[in-house]
Structures are given as C-alpha cells and as structure tokens.
Image (spheres, rainbow, N blue to C red):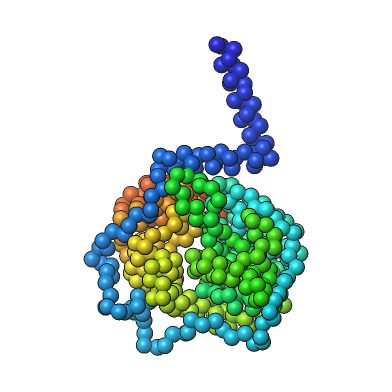
Amino acid sequence: MRKLLIAALLLTLLAAALYQIPEVNRRLSWRMDIALTYLRGVFQPADQAPMPLPPPAVAITSRPPGTPIASLGATDTPGPSPTSPPTPTPLPRAVSLPASAWEEQDINNCGPAALAMYLRFYGWEGDQFDIADLLKPQREDRNVNVEELAYYVRTRAGWLNVEYRVGGDLNLLKAFLAASIPIMIEESFYFEAPYWPNDDLWAAHYNLLTGYDDAAQTFTSQDSFHGADQKVAYATVDEYWQAFNRVYILVFPPDKLETVKAILGEDWDADVNREHALLTAEAETQSQPDNAFAWFNLGTNLVYFERYPEAALAYDRAREIGLPQRMLRYQFGPFFAYFHTGRMDDLMALVKYALQRTPTSEEAYLWRGWGYYRQGKVREAVADFETALAQNPLYQDAQYALDFVRASQ
C-alpha cells in the first residue's frame, strides 16, 4: 500500500511538472477549463438572468404613454437622422481584398486572432499570442473589449490608425471594403456543443470581413473559428451583428484618413455617431418590440449619454424578454445604469449571475465592488477591485476604483 501511495505521489508530481511546460499547458489547460466549466454548470444551473426588481422611488419608473424612451429629456432641436452617410460614388457589385494568412484562434481568443489577421494585412509581423499576452494575460479571460483591441493598435502598431464606431449597416461595411479597408465586427456566435447543462450555446465572436458579392448577397470573412474565406449571407451578418450594437473596428494607414472620414461623414464625430445609433435602436424597439437586443442596444446608447434612468428601463425590458446566458460576459451597460439609478439590488443580482457564468470576469468583479462600496462594505469592495486587477493588470477602471476607495479611507 505504501508503495502505491509513493507511486501515486510521484506520478502527481511528474504531471504537475509536465503541466508547467508551456506547450503542454497550452494543450491541456483548456480541457481542464472546459471540465471545470461544466461542473460549475451542474452545481450552478444556467437559468435565465434574473428578472428586474421594482425600481426605487428615486428612479424614473414610468413615462407618458406612447413616448419613446429615447425622447425623454430630449430638447426640441431635431436630432440627426439614423440613416448612413451617402457614399460619394456608386459601390462596385463585388469586392475581394487579399487576405493575410488565416490563423485559427486559441481558446477564448477570437479578438486577438481576428486583430492579428487584420494587422498582418498592413504588414505587421506577429500573431494572436502577441496580442493576447498584453490584453488578456489570463488565458481563461473570455472577453476582450473593443477598447482593449484599439489600445493594442495604438500602443503596439502605432504607425496605423484605429477607430471604432457603433450603429453600422451593411452599406457602410461595403463602402469600407470598396475603399480597400477590411473591417472587423463583433457579432453573435453559436457553439456546436454545450459547455454546461441547459447551455443556450450563444456567445460573442469577432470577425474580419475582406469582401462582398451583391449577386450572391454574401460577405467574405476571415473567421478565426470556422476558417478562411467564409461566405456569410448579408441577412445573417446583420442579424448577428445587432446583438453588439453593430460595432465595427477600423484599422487603416494614415494616408487613408480622409477616405475614412468621407465614408463616415457625420459619424466621424463619436457623439453624433451615438446619436445615430440611439435613434436606430429606438426605431428597432418599435419595429421589433420583442427583440431583446434592440432594447439592450437602446439602453447601451442611453448609457453613453449618461441618461441612466431611461437606460435602466430599456435594460429592464430586455431582461423581461430574455437575454442570452453569456450576455453580461461581453457588455456591461446594465451595471452602469443600475448603479447610477441607485438600484443596488438589481446590480448585485446581475453581477452574481455574471460571475456564475464567467468567474474570471474582471468587469463583474469591478461592479460588484462598486455595489459593495455603495452598501458600505469597503473591505469587500477592495477585495473585488484587487481581484479584477489580478484578472487583468491593465484594467484601469479597477485601478481607479482601488485608488479612490483607499484615498477615501
């Protein structure tokens, strides 16, 4: 018996040593992560996100019948129309840009992989791991925000310009491709197999578009998961893109700056762009009243303008309709809205749910920390801010929160 115990101990130590080898760790860690994710789903079943609670009296809880949410508090000055800026010349019927070498994504790495293919279009030499090492040093980090991807370009590929906007449409995508500028979008993605019992299979995905064909009604994408030169129907792109407020990332050389400005038109101004996106989202809540993504986008665009009570109402409606289980892994507008309207019970319920689905979410730890701070639980708040920074040392919002709370003591 003693020999068996010694042998088992030696095997355990050997396995631990082998696991420290980078290539072995890379190959095995994701399998362990998947197994732990499934077990967590068994003990913490993936029910629907919690329903909104009755708002406190200090928040706006109703609006005049028939009044669109986005119009509350608006001035009488007519806002910009939600239409795209006109393109100066007719677009070609088809465009196919030369794609750089396709790169299969590592686990949880579609953002760095798509950006790596994008940057290589302009001669950058590197791969997804160069990007991931900076933006998500924890391999289990399941989300890279648009802002983080832009940060990488600005600080590690500074000879290129980068911009991102929201509220795009298919003609805008085509206009950039016709100008020889690939374009990167964030969209819905569906897994082929569940990661936990009752998994709704929905997730986020970054995709790089390099062409289109009006005759076939398809875009060409360099998809880090599905493969190179994927043909995706126009309608599918728009449907999947809507879930992320139709955000798009533009990387381009300085000599393309005026071209980008001309295509964007008024949307070159980030505030005007958000006004357009706000009006588009509001229109879609009226034409698609049971579409949770339309209401979520409305809330997100209202948060941008710090119209938090109205945003909270829009998020309430999205939650009532039903959001995907992983939604709060990628988008955090509800945390802003409920915190700034004093709806701490809603905030804490949502961050608890977010951490059940994504225990590595630095954003959820940040907002749970702010919730604790508002409740007077300073020690718990500091612990969550520190955890957020441990997950992502570059997370400036967590560093600010930690500095703020410590300075206030």
Q: Is residue 42 left or right of residue 228?
A: left
Residue ranking furthest to the front: 216
- The answer to whether residue 137 is above or below residue 242 is above
Q: Considering depth in this image, is 120 or 229 the residue closer to the camera? A: 229
Instruction: Tell me which corner region of the image, top left, top right, bottom left or bottom right, holds residue 3.
Output: top right
| Residue in view at x 62 percent, y 38 percent | 28
| Residue in view at x 26 percent, y 61 percent | 54
Percent x, y of residue 100:
74, 62
| Residue in view at x 46 percent, y 46 percent | 359
Percent x, y of residue 129:
67, 51
- The answer to whether residue 260 is above or below residue 369 is below
Q: Considering depth in this image, is 306 or 235 the residue closer to the camera? A: 235
Q: Is residue 24 left or right of residue 71?
A: right
Residue ranking furthest to the left: 57
Q: Considering depth in this image, is 83 or 215 the residue closer to the camera? A: 215
Q: Is residue 2 visible?
A: yes
- The answer to whether residue 208 is above or below residue 193 is below
* Quarter of the image where the N terminus is located: top right
Q: Is residue 385 visible?
A: no
Percent x, y of residue 204:
53, 58
Q: Is residue 85 left or right of residue 52?
A: right
Percent x, y of residue 342:
31, 62
| Residue in view at x 43 percent, y 69 percent | 294
Q: Considering depth in this image, is 164 or 365 the residue closer to the camera? A: 164
How many discs mark residues in the rendered view? 0
